[in-house]
Image (tube, grey):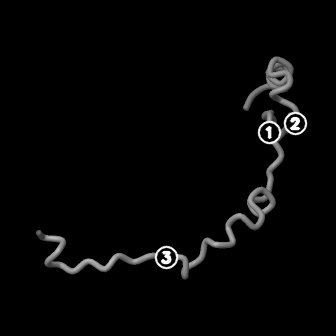
Amino acid sequence: MGREVLVRETKEKLGIRAVGREVIEGNGTYELREPQTPYEAVFGLENVDLREDNTFYRDISTSESRG
């Protein structure tokens, strides 16, 4: 966070790496921010298989773990 001039200069120096980032003002300070992307939009259906019934429990008795 900082002065607007410094943040805009930083964005300019970043060049192509700053594409999509915006200078945002809040309470007298400025930031270079990327737009927030919802988690679901990024991963979509990739995480469908992550649920409770997708768990494997090991069957280890106490006597085996001591040996």
Residue type pointed to by label 2: Glu
Q: CA distance from mark 1 to mark 2?
A: 5 Å
SS at circle 2? strand
- Position of 23 relative to 61 (above/below): above
Q: Which residue is mark 2?
A: 22
Q: Position of residue 57 (x, y in %)?
A: 39, 77
Q: Quadrant of the N terminus?
A: top right
Residue at 18% x, 78% y is 62
Identity of the amino acid at label 3? Thr
Instruction: Describe the element under mark 3 as helix, strand or loop.
Output: loop
Foreground: disc 2 or disc 3: 3
Asked if marks 2 and 3 touch (Cβ < 8 Å), the reply is no
| Residue at 18 percent of width and 71 percent of height | 65
Horizontally, is 12 left or right of 53 in the view?
right
**Gap in angstroms between the C-alphas marked 2 and 3:** 43 Å
User: Identity of the amino acid at label 1?
Assistant: Arg
Which residue is found at the position 74% from the left and 59% from the top?
Answer: 43
Q: N-terminal of the two: label 1 or label 2?
A: 2
Report x, y in % for residue 45: 75, 67
17, above or below 36, in the image = above
Q: Could you say which quadrant of the image residue 56 lies in?
A: bottom left
Mark 2 or mark 3: name the one nearer the start of the chain. 2
The vertical placement of 63 against 33, above or below, is below
Which type of secondary structure does the marked residue at label 1 adopt? strand
Residue under label 1: 33
Q: Which residue is mark 3?
A: 55
Residue 49 located left or right of residue 53: right
Which residue corresponds to the image point at 31% horizontal and 80% vertical from the top-left? Answer: 59
